[in-house]
Amino acid sequence: GFITAPTGGAPDANLIPVPKPVADASMDAAACIGCGACVAACPNGAANLFVGAKISHLNLLPQGQAERYKRAEAMVDTMDEHFGSCTNHGECSAACPKEISLDVIALMNKDYRSAKFKNRKELSRN
């Protein structure tokens, strides 16, 4: 048999409180329009600013935490396959019409390293 217990449903995502600084940082990253100016301006043809903006937009919010590290790992691995590597010239941010900050690259790198470290810990347990 089974027991029925009133546990409630999933919380409405619009009712989850988000601190203003987190919401502001997420919305700043969400301003990216995907125009490609950052990739065109980069001497290495890196897409780190674009990918960092997309990852940061979702990973900063509480609603994005469940897939945070999987998302960062998958997107960065795909980016590394198809684009050049970032050498921190900053040309991307200077060319961005939405003035996306280089901070999104730092957040992306942090989440990517955390994802790789988490995977390594899981592999060592098996």
Image (tube, rainbow, N blue to C red):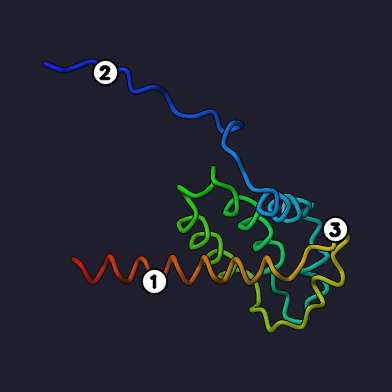
Q: Residue 117 carries which label?
A: 1
Q: Is mark 2 on a helix, strand or loop?
A: loop
Q: Can you give x and y, in whole percent of width and height, for residue 104 in the image?
A: 68, 65
Q: Residue at x 54, y 42 (%)?
A: 63
Residue at disc 3, secondary structure:
loop
- Could you say whether the residue bearing mark 1 is in a helix, strand or loop? helix
Looking at the image, tell me whether mark 2 or mark 1 is earlier in sequence order. 2
Q: What residue type is labelled 2?
A: Ala
How many C-alpha atoms fall within 10 Å of the one at disc 2: few (<14), some, or many (≥20)? few
Which residue carries the number 2 mark? 5
Q: How far apart are marks 3 and 2 (CA)?
A: 49 Å
Query: Quick one: label 1, few (<14), some, or many (20+) residues within 10 Å?
Result: few
| Front-most of residues 51 and 18 | 18
Q: Is the residue 68 above or below the residue 113 in the image? A: above
**Looking at the image, which residue sits at the far left?**
1
Residue at the spot 42% in from the left edge and 23% down from the top edge:
9
Give the mark nearest the N terminus, 3 or 2.
Answer: 2
Tell me the residue that label 3 is attached to.
Answer: 98
Q: Which amino acid does label 3 sit on?
A: Lys
Q: Where is residue 86 in the image (x, y as percent from the top left)?
A: 67, 79
